[in-house]
Amino acid sequence: MRKAKVMLLTFMLLVNMLIPAGCWNYKEVEDLAIAAGLAVDKDPKDGKYLLTVEIIKPQAQEKEMQIKSTTVKMKGDTIFSAIRNFIALTGKKLYWSHAKVIIVSKEIAQENIVPIIDWINRDAEVRPDMFLIISREKTAGEILESSVEIESIVSFQLEDMLKNKKSLSTYPSFELWEFINDLSAKGISAAAATVNTVTVKGKTKPQMHGTAIFKKDTQVGWFNGSETRGLLWLRNEMKGGALIEELANIKGKQTKITLEIFDAKTKIKPVYKDDRLVMNVNINMEAAIAEIDAAGADLLDKKVESEIKQAVVEEMKRRLQNAIKKAQSYQSDVFGFGQLIQREMPSLWKQMEPNWDEIFPQLDTDININIDIRSSALTSRSIKVGD
Amino acid sequence: MFNKLFNTAHLKLTKSIDQNISLFQKIFSHDRTIIFRHFKAGYKNIKCCLIYVDEMADREIINENIMQPVMYLDEYENIPQSKILDFIVNKVLISGNVKKSSDISCLAEAILYGDTMLLVDGFSEILIIDTKGWKVRSITPPETEKVVRGAREGFTESIIINLSLIRRKLLTTDLKFEFKQLGTRTKTTICICYIEGLAPAKIINELEKRLDNINIDGVLDSGYIEELIKDSPLSPFKTIGSTERPDTVAGKLLEGRVAVVCDGSPFVLTLPHIFIEAFQVNEDYYNNFIFASINRMLRYFSFFLTISVPSIFLALTTYHQEMIPTPLLLSIAASREGVPFPTVVEAAAMLVTFEMLREAGVRLATPIGQTVSIVGALVLGEAAVTAKFASAPMIIVVALTGITSYLITEMLGALILVRIILLLLSSVLGLYGYIFGVIGLFIHLMSMRSFGVPYMLNVSSINVRDLKDTAVRAPWYAMYFRPKLMTKNMLRKSGPRLIERR
């Protein structure tokens, strides 16, 4: 009897533990409104946030499955209140764990980006590995509403574009947590990818290009494709697989050369030279010739090879200098030179830190590039033109 | 008959054959299968009577080896009357096994077991002649444990044949058979087999103690014994093994285990039985050790899958959608579209349907069984998805669960229970509940013992010696030791390289 009582009590305790504690987070898959991406604009009239969310609508057809998306617009004083307004519009709660991108309009970025990303950084459901994109031409909402070719969902295609950027490198890809890290760290400024649109056959399509440069929490300038490469070089983010095309002067002729990078490493070291602080940039890369338009050039010839190297190095230097100059004109240290000085010369950084905004634009750089051309793919010569 | 047999104590055999016959006629009244054959031996016309059970005793033996020689007793007319019985035993009967007895209950039991009584006038003792000759099933491949490679013989219902099958594998004088009788009415013969020097005496003593404590009127299958003597009787897990294969029994005996053979059952019990034995299959030891190890690992993996897949799927799709890769989530969401039931109801319903199909298929005749599987698999599965009663991923989950459970048939019953409990836990608490369920399962498994041997012996060990026959099946030349704790005599074989190998 006593044993039975104890067992009954234990059983009831267990059941009670399960019932009051259970199910609080229960939600069926088909009841979720799965958000794929978020676009944030500001209504110019009343200054409220205008959110566009791309929602995935999975539909099972007869045999095959179709995944379509739709966009919903919401308005609110804060991001969160706008998002909660979604319930008033659709009756469902948005599910953010699978959202891939957040697109912020140029206007908001130029004003202050922190209020937008605070909610994302704070909320448990939203992942901080979303990609941050700044919309340069259109409003952010228009990007999500544009049409895409390969994927059926705009946000997923934007994610693909950013994930596979390494072979192109004309735009960076920063996940939100990286952006926030750069934003809050001293001695480095944040940057984000930018998106434009192109019109093909009357349809607006998103196209990634260039970088938005931030100073503190506001966007101050843009980098174009070649300057973005400079940024990626200097941040040591050029990886194998990237292609760089350079103009070179070979035997007095302007020749286009495309190199495929196998391995690249950038080392930057601040040094004192003639009492001036100089950023010593050393780039080592292994590359192969992927394409060359000099007819009949013999690439086995050491002389030709060194000419090509020389030409490429000059061209790259020029571009890197351009990118650095542009960043200096924005007073935005997107390369993280400040952090490097802090790491290498901490005492100097303590003196410099209050005036870094003035010092950075004056900073000198010394660029050394070392290219090792490993091969020229399948042929050693260019195509000879006969009769 | 129960009462009669126990009331025979006051009955006594007399020297008069007629009185003795009427005594047995009283005992076996209303039983027409008992045959009383009266005849007269020799020219002296000594009254004799044979009593046997029709079809239990072999008539050919009775006719040729008992009746014929006894009837032609003529040439031995000089024998004094008082020595006739001994003379019949010693010189007349052509039988390998003849006993004299005057215990009525013992005599009655003997003829019920197929022996024949020979009553001779003038003696209060009766001869029991071994004439057991009922029809038995021939030795066929076991239905439940099929093999690709390995012996094809399986146990039958006859204990003597079964013991001969075991004996044939182990030609050692150390192999001991101890007989016992269980069941006050069925008087089922059981036999404890072990190899002396390998099987620990403690376990044999404990087994005998438990068997002696059994008080039941009938033992129709070894399952009765298993349930009556097993450790952790409320657990769904088996703590006593059973097999239909003589080679498996021989293997277990060689590892120091004890076997219990029960008359009338082709399933022989082996004990102690530990968790990993469910994953060890006799064929593992006959096949290439690499192949066997792969198979064994598949079984472990299946064990995990078959208890976990429905609950993990449920937990992920109803609580932790962020853990599913986006394309998979979309595909699940698309196929869940329009399904009216919550995922947990869907999962439980499909699992129950699967178990129903299994139960329906097991006992049906083979042709109908196939029809059931076709109806179940094709019609139910396909139609349920088309009619939106269930989603396609759930069908896959249930199918996977079902298939994987058949890799560990020995645990089938326990697996079904564990699976359902985990499913309910994860339906209430998500992965948290699942993990709690798994912890509970392991606490239960770890706390069990089988005849003093920890049930999870060697499962959690990473000692190389322990792993040789658990996670993998090491090649025979590398296995020097019998399983730990099972026996004191650990050395399986001796070799000059023993020290290095260990």
Image (tube, coloured by chain):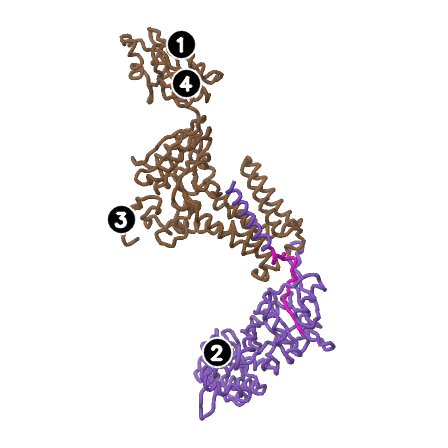
Q: Which residue is mark 3?
A: B495
Dot 1 corresponds to which residue? B18
Q: CA distance from mark 2 to mark 4?
A: 115 Å
Q: Which residue is mark 4?
A: B8
Q: Residue B7 location in percent, x, y?
A: 43, 19
Mark 4 and mark 3: Cα distance apart in space: 61 Å
Report the side of A225 relative to B220 (left or right): right
Give the Cα distance between marks 1 and 4. 18 Å
Task: Check disc 4: other Cα within 10 Å, few if <14, some if 14-19, many if 20+.
Answer: some
In the image as oriented, which residue stretches furthest toward the front? A2
Q: Which mark is residue A219?
A: none
- Seen from this angle, which residue lies furthest left? B496
Residue B187 located within the stretch drawn in magenta: no
Chain colored brown = B
What span is in magenta? A22-40
Label 3 sits on what residue type?
Gly
Q: Chain of mark 2?
A: A
For marks 3 and 1, the one nearer the N-term is 1
Q: Colour of chain A?
A: purple
Which mark lies nearer to you, 3 or 2?
3
Q: Residues within 10 Å of mark 1 (few under 14, many from 20)?
A: some
Residue on which disc 2 sits: A381
Q: Secondary structure at mark 4?
A: helix
Chain letter of disc 4? B
